[in-house]
Image (cartoon, rainbow, N blue to C red):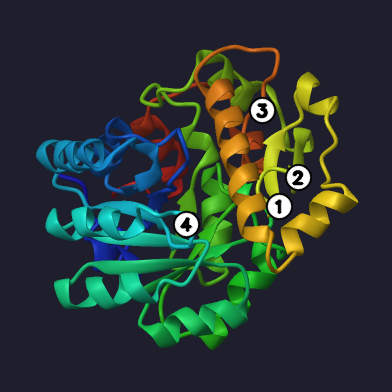
Amino acid sequence: MKNKIFKNELTKMLNIDFPIIVAPMFLVSNSKMLIEAGKSGITGCVPALNYKNLSELKLAIQDVKTHTNGPMGVNLIVNKFNTKMLDQLKVCVDLNVDYIITSLGNPNPVINVCKPKGIKVFCDVVDLKYAKKVEALGADAIIAVNNRAGGHLGPMPPEELIPILVKNCGIPIISAGGVSTSSDLKAILELGASGVSIGTPFIATNEADVSQEYKQAIVDYGAEDIVVTDRISGSKCTIINTPYVQSLPLKANSFERFLFKNKWLKKYFKMFRWAKGTQMFKNSAFAATYKTVWCAGPSLEGVKSIRSVSQVVSDLTKDYSTT
């Protein structure tokens, strides 16, 4: 039996050995990854939108709960574009998931439902303003999305963001972005974070169901190959600068920027761009294609091979090995 060498707010809250969350990754996260995370002494979170319907979401949660005693989380998109959110939330509550991570909207409805049930709610934020808002609403922890995150990213580096939030907030701060090695983990924890949410290194794992080409790209490309685009959803998003991506304009043009900001049209244009971008990611994630658009963060720099989830965890925590 492993010794629990971490004793901080997050490990106690979730009853885990190490303060690491396998980040919820669109199209990538699955129940196999969460099961192995639980067996490895950490925890994993899966986006509800990775499942086509509520029945699939329910089966995935039940699968994780059957095969590991470790805690599991579900990520809910809480803006207006996710018309399934309330139904997804009900499934999570009915099956008693351990925590929910909210993204891209107001978490208040989720907090109000989960608090009485003892389900923890962690909220994505990118700055102090929103961190204070979600803390006031009753969030249990803050996911501090920094400028090294994969997918949607924040504007601030972790060295700036984490100390500000730790100083001004009274709940645990979980850093999201830029961690792929044990030294990265140590540096973030020394900034005062209670834990980390790690995505990109877990793309290149045996348990991920994405294509072998996508996994190998995480190994072969480096931090300098990550570019940022705002054309997919109107928000900045990181992708790998593949030959196909090099042929595309990364910035929204003036007409697109007008549509993204127009009071009456932005809702519909964002829905259109989100649907189109989602299909593009799906086409790229599961099969080799010349139109390859792979989502990843600069932390792929520290990924040198395709490993198991358990090996990734072992490599991340080697500086904290049991005594």
Disc 4, SS: strand
- The correct choice, above or below, for 61 with respect to 90 in the image is above
Q: CA distance from mark 1 to mark 4?
A: 21 Å
SS class, disc 2: strand
The percent position of residue 319, horizontal first and vertical second, equals 45, 48
Q: Earlier in the sequence, mark 3 or mark 4?
A: 4
Marks 1 and 3 close (CB-CB < 8 Å):
no
Using the image, tell me which numbered label, if any, was put on residue 236. Answer: 1
Residue at image mark 2: 228
| Cα distance between the residues tagged 1 and 3 | 15 Å
Q: Alpha carbon of mark 2 to alpha carbon of mark 4: how far?
A: 22 Å
**Going 44% across and 26% down the picture, which residue do you hit?**
205
Which is more N-terminal, label 4 or label 2? 4
Q: Which mark is residue 196?
A: 4
Cα distance, mark 1 to mark 2? 6 Å
Q: Position of residue 6 (x, y in %)?
A: 32, 61
Of the residues under marks 2 and 3, which one precedes in the sequence?
2
Q: Mark 2: few, some, or many residues within 10 Å (few <14, many ≥20)? A: many
Label 3: few (<14), some (14–19) or many (≥20) C-alpha neighbours in 10 Å: many
The residue positioned 63% from the left and 22% from the top of the image is 217
Q: Is residue 178 visible?
A: no
Q: Is residue 247 above or below residue 116?
A: above
Do the residues bearing badges 1 and 2 touch, measured as CB atoms within 8 Å?
yes
Where residue 283 appears, as percent x and y from the top left, is 56, 22
Nearest to viewer (mark 2 / mark 4): 2
N-term mark: 1 or 2: 2
54 or 74, nearer to the observer: 54
Q: Amino acid at mark 3?
A: Val
Quick one: which residue is furthest to the right in this view? 254
Image disc number at residue 12: none
Dot placed on the residue nearer the N-terminal end, 1 or 4: 4
